[in-house]
Amino acid sequence: MDYTPTNPTPLSPSDYAGVSQAASDLRSHSSDSISDFAATQPQAVKAAAVEKAQNFRAYAGEKAAAIKQEAGAKIKQGAAKAKEIHVSAEDYVREHPTKSILGAVGVGVIIGLIMRR
């Protein structure tokens, strides 16, 4: 589609002055708004970055606390399991002392043979 006027009207010299003034006003307004935008934009970006950093710090702190709590629970479970295994091993040795001593001697001999090579 062609949007050129079919019968353009030539501008008079007084029209040129109005157009020139309008262009000048537009340039000054644009430069003022660009200056205002350029002055406020870094502050807005900084504020957004600070907010994101604070949110990330809070999120990371929450995750670290959750991981620490979970690790503490796992350590307690591991300690309880180790104590349980220790108690059952003691009971086995008390119930079967001969088997335990012979087993320990056998393991010692095997380790000795391996170390000798």
Image: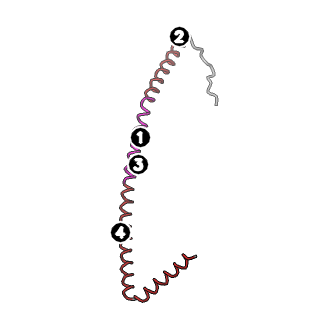
Please tell me whether mark 4 or mark 2 is closer to you in this view.
4
Placement of the N terminus among the 4 image quadrants:
top right
In the rendered structure, which disc, 1 or 4, sits on the residue that comes first in sequence? 1
Is 55 within the magenta? Answer: yes
In the rendered structure, which disc, 3 or 4, sits on the residue that comes first in sequence? 3
The residue at which mark 1 appears reads as 48
Please tell me whether mark 2 or mark 3 is closer to you in this view.
3
Please tell me whether mark 1 or mark 4 is closer to you in this view.
4
In the rendered structure, which disc, 1 or 2, sits on the residue that comes first in sequence? 2
Image disc number at residue 56: 3
Along the line of sight, the residue nearer the viewer: 28 or 92: 92
Disc 4 element = helix
Image disc number at residue 76: 4
Q: Amino acid at mark 1?
A: Ala
Placement of the C terminus among the 4 image quadrants:
bottom right
The residue at which mark 2 appears reads as 14
Disc 2 element = helix
Q: Does 35 appear above or below 12?
A: below
Q: Amino acid at mark 4?
A: Lys
Q: Does 117 appear above or below 11?
A: below
Disc 3 element = helix
Please tell me whether mark 3 or mark 1 is closer to you in this view.
3
- Pointer 3 and pointer 4: residues touching (CB < 8 Å)? no
- Secondary structure predominantly adopted by residues drawn in magenta: helix
In the rendered structure, which disc, 4 or 2, sits on the residue that comes first in sequence? 2
Is 64 within the magenta? Answer: no
Which residue is rendered at x = 43% and y = 37% of the image? 45
Please tell me whether mark 1 or mark 2 is closer to you in this view.
1
- Pointer 1 and pointer 4: residues touching (CB < 8 Å)? no
Q: Is residue 67 left or right of residue 31?
A: left
